[in-house]
Amino acid sequence: MNRLFHVPLSPFCRKVRLSLAEKKIEVELVEERYWEQQPEFMRRNPAGKVPVLKMGGRVMTESAAICEYIEEAHPQPALMPEGKDARFEVRRLVAWFDDKFHQEVTSKLLYERVNKKIMGRGYPESKNVKAGAQKIKYHLDYMGWLLDQRRWLAGDVMTLADFAAAAHLSALDYISDVDWNRSAVVKDWYAKIKSRPAFRSILADQVPGFPPPAHYADLDF
């Protein structure tokens, strides 16, 4: 059995989960308290972070590398388009969300509000929360600009770029930190992507002490 060591609200884990589910690859989800740096987990990934995927006799780390491996090993349904230019755009946007969005928004909102409490690392820093709440507006506007020109974020077909964005936004939506009224086109995009069967386990996540809002699992908001 394939096993994914993960944290439910980690956007990097969610991106891998979405890729696996879209390709109908069964996987056992194992929650990992990676911050405790247990020796067994550190042997799996000396970097001490999730996700870690055990599949096909391999132990794989780093979400971007894992998703590319999954794509090469299971090319259908495709999450990377044909053509070097189209693939570049997907990789660019995946990096945008996993780097810039993560640094400016996810780490300022999700990590302050949720991760600190779970890890026992104190209380949220209000200045970080305010900064994240401000920055997400810029990112939603950028997504809206992209979606005004394209059916999906990277082009006319759904790709890994959409899953990367949805992984971050779904984790933030779990704690009601996304203003879906800011952009109708972004809201429509998210409603479309979270209606996919691959999203079912994401919408079923429950984190003790942090109940999701009523709209979180509502496909029609």
Image (cartoon, grey):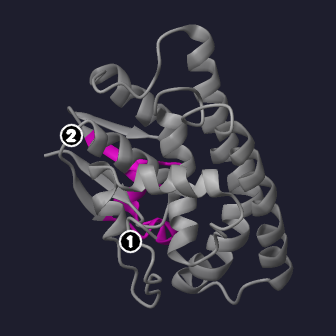
Q: Is residue 155 left or right of residue 30?
A: right
Q: Amino acid at mark 2?
A: Ile
Under tag 2, what secondary structure? loop
- Residue 152, by quadrant, is top right
Q: Is residue 23 left or right of residue 189?
A: left
Q: Are marks 1 and 2 in contact (CB under 8 Å)?
A: no
Residue where numbered disc 2 is placed: 25
- Residue 123, by quadrant, is bottom right
Q: Is residue 191 left or right of residue 186?
A: left
Residue at x 69%, y 37% (from the top left corner): 146
Tag 2 or tag 1, which sits nearer the N-term? 2
Q: Is residue 15 above or below residue 203?
A: above
Magenta span = 31-54
Badge 2, how many Cα within 10 Å: few under 14, some, many 20+? few
Residue lying at the far top of the rendered structure: 83
Foreground: 76 or 29?
Answer: 76
Q: Is residue 172 above or below residue 84?
A: below
Residue 122 shows in the view: yes
Q: Is residue 215 magenta?
A: no
Q: Is residue 49 magenta?
A: yes
Residue at x 13%, y 46% (from the top left corner): 1
In the image, which disc is placed on residue 218?
1
